[in-house]
Amino acid sequence: MPQVQTNTAYILWFLCILGICGGQRFYSGKIASGLLYLVTFGLFGFGQLIDLLLIPGMVEKRNIYLRGLYARNLDLSNVQPAVTLNLGQLSQPQPQPLVEPPAVSPLHRLLRIAQEQGGTLSAAQVALYTGLEPEAVQSLLQEAQRYGYAEVCNDPQTGAVRYRFDV
């Protein structure tokens, strides 16, 4: 695989003393700027001085380009990758913990129950269906009212207090 050498590029740079500027650029594959350096005497000498610092990078870029060309032309049809597998070092799969469904809030559960029961519930029905204590039931019903999910009304036949839910 052909490679460009940094030392050779510096030797070509020294040709600017003889008035031949841009040799290092031709050597590193930069033909257009090499011609510009040749015609303008290395950009009036300033470009030649700057190239003293840029030569290692130009050479490296050229070598990367040449390696890419070389690798593209390789015949990889009969290359077989080697794989080594040491079964003694394989770890046993760890059982994953079961993911619990997210806990449903009491208010959300109350809204579901109200939807299943036709939208109207008494406090006793809420306690029965949710399994909550009476204080928690009252607190939950007040929270539903505060959010506007429920309103207090009376049963037209018995006059009992009912909670009508907007579900």
Image (cartoon, grey):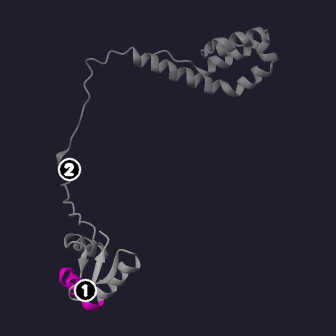
In which quadrant of the rendered image does the C terminus lie?
Answer: bottom left
Where residue 165 appears, as percent x and y from the top left, is 30, 74
Q: Quadrant of residue 97?
A: bottom left
Tag on residue 90?
2
Q: Quadrant of residue 130?
A: bottom left
Tag on residue 155?
none
Where residue 84 appears, as percent x and y from the top left, is 23, 38
Tell me the amino acid under the disc marked 2: Leu
Q: Which residues are magenta?
A: 122-135
Visible residue check, residue 21: no
- Residue 128 is a magenta residue: yes
Q: CA distance from mark 2 to mark 1?
A: 59 Å
x 78%, y 17%: residue:
43
Q: Is residue 131 left or right of residue 50?
A: left
- Viewer-nearest of discs 2 and 1: 1
Residue placed farthest to the right in the image?
44
x 23%, y 80%: residue:
121
Tag on residue 123?
1
What kind of element bears circle 2?
loop
